[in-house]
């Protein structure tokens, strides 16, 4: 007879996400009515005491949203009903600068996710958002003395020094007319970060924001605005998670990144939403001459995802690199990829993505490379590798290239395959179980991405892969 310690199960119904799926009581939180109306939009703006131009933008965005059809070319989002989504949930605390002042249940949430520990170890600044509002924000004095501004975007909007700059940049890269959920974001956005790095400032330690959606049947619509001036450098880290419910939740945030001349920005994110989440986030960067944007990205959660970070290379010699991984398990349909616009001479872009699908998960990679008539002597390479772990899963690659300039070098390659039995046999001959062998192969497949992540995020990614793989060899 074989005991439990000798034979592990060969199939699991779902991943043990106890680290992320814990739920906190929300009975004392302030909830607006579900749905989307001008009255709700006005109430959000009034609660935040916003300038008139922001309210006008919100109402205009709502009109645009109502005029847009739902997307029909990607995964179905029929299960998302905005009449049952709460667009604003205020935690029972205002933003705090001291971790000790954060309410215990919220503090416990972020303690369990490792945020304070990460702050103490090596981060220059941390922002933590709970549902619709930032609950904690702190930055090291050394970074502040360098002239770096890292605050909640709503807080910066109340400062006359920054309101004009926000006005000039807010939803300029991602206008409400871009698509239906950009318009939704413009109408009901709440929370998020504002970062300003002055010219010539090189920050050696990263800044980090973490977004936690706790409320059942709610949406989170944070806005991140980062401006890195000429010859400056920044690494920004973003993480997200939510517990699992039996109703739809929605994430429709926006990230706008402005990279100055010869400036460098690395933007790292791990999105680990629960599998009832519709993740319809929009991220976009624009680079001036000699500017450099690096995207390091992993998507492990959500029921349905539409995610395509975009780089617009507007200055001579600007560069973009995108390194990402997607893991689609049971009940997940993740439509991801990236976009690049080469809009100046001698620009360069590279894309390297990995996707893993199992238990009937669907992973679709879409890439769009546009070389305008201004893109003389520019180059772009796109590489997509997909790994399917069973015969029930699906992986597709859909590249698009629009080249309007003769003197450019654009290339695309894609491979789709399964774990080879010979590799599994070799590792088993070295003493590993079949499950351990398959997990090791998947970790090796994901290694080009994990090695680029900050340490605790690389560990989180590897743990997520381990959880997804555990027992799943049959």
Image: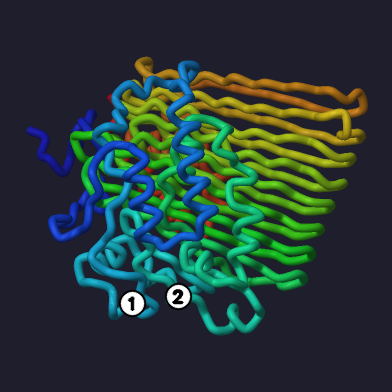
Query: Label 1: how many residues lie within 10 Å, few (<14), some (14-19) or many (20+)?
Result: some
Taking 421 as reference, is 24 above or below it? Answer: below
In this rendering, the answer to whether 292 lies above or below 183 is below
**Left or right position of 252 against 255:** left
Checking the image for residue 138, the label placed there is 2
The label shown at residue 99 is: 1
Q: Can residue 431 be seen from the camera position used here?
A: no
Residue 87 percent coordinates (x, y):
32, 45
Image check: 3 left or right of 372?
left
Could you say which is closer to the camera, residue 212 or residue 187? 187
User: What colouring method underlies this structural image?
Assistant: rainbow
Residue 301: percent from left, percent from top: 37, 39
Q: In what element is the residue under mark 1?
A: helix
Residue shown at 61% from the left, 47% from the top: 295
Q: Secondary structure at mark 2?
A: strand
Q: Quadrant of residue 431?
A: top left
Q: Viewer-proximal residue, 147 or 466?
A: 147
Image height of 104 relative to 446, above or below:
below
| Residue 282 percent coordinates (x, y) | 53, 40
Q: Inspect this view and state whether residue 256 appears.
A: yes
Residue 400 appears in which quarter of the rendering?
top right
């Amino acid at each position: 007879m074989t005991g439990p310690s000798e034979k592990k199960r060969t199939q699991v119904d779902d991943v043990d996400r106890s680290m992320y799926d814990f739920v906190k009581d929300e009975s004392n939180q302030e909830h607006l009515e579900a749905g989307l109306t001008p009255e709700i939009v006005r109430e959000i703006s009034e609660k935040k005491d916003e300038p008139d131009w922001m309210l006008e933008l919100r109402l205009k965005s709502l009109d645009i949203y109502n005029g847009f059809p739902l997307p029909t070319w990607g995964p179905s989002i029929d299960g998302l009903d905005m009449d049952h989504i709460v667009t604003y949930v205020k935690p029972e605390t205002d933003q705090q600068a001291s971790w000790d002042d954060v309410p215990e249940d919220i503090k416990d949430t972020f303690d369990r996710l490792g945020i304070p520990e990460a702050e103490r170890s090596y981060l220059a600044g941390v922002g933590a958002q709970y549902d619709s509002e930032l609950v904690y924000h702190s930055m090291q004095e050394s970074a502040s003395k360098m002239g770096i501004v890292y605050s909640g975007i709503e807080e910066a909007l109340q400062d006359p020094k920054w309101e004009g700059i926000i006005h000039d940049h807010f939803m300029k890269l991602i206008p409400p007319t871009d698509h239906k959920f950009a318009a939704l974001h413009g109408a009901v956005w709440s929370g998020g970060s504002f970062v300003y790095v002055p010219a010539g400032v090189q920050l050696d330690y990263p800044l980090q924001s973490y977004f936690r959606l706790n409320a059942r049947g709610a949406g989170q619509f944070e806005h991140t605005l980062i401006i890195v001036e000429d010859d400056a450098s920044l690494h920004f880290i973003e993480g997200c998670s939510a517990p699992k419910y039996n109703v739809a939740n929605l994430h429709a945030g926006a990230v706008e990144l402005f990279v100055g001349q010869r400036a460098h920005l690395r933007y790292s994110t791990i999105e680990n939403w629960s599998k009832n989440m519709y993740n319809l986030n929009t991220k976009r960067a624009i680079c001036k001459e000699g500017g450099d944007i690096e995207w390091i990205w992993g998507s492990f959660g959500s029921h349905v995802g539409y995610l395509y970070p975009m780089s617009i290379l507007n200055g001579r010699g600007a560069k973009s690199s995108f390194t990402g991984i997607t893991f689609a398990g049971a009940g997940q349909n993740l439509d991801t990829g990236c976009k690049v616009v080469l809009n100046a001479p001698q620009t360069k872009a590279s894309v390297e993505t990995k996707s893993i699908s199992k238990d009937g998960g669907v992973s679709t990679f879409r890439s769009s490379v546009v070389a305008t008539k201004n893109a003389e002597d520019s180059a772009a390479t796109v590489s997509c590798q997909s790994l399917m772990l069973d015969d029930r899963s699906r992986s597709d690659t859909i590249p698009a290239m629009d080249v309007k300039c003769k003197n450019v070098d654009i290339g695309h390659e894609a491979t789709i395959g399964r774990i080879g039995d010979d590799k599994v046999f070799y590792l088993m001959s070295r003493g590993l179980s079949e499950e351990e062998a398959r997990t090791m192969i998947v970790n090796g497949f994901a290694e080009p991405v994990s090695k680029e992540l900050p340490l605790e995020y690389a560990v989180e990614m590897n743990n997520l892969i381990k959880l997804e793989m555990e027992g799943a060899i049959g």
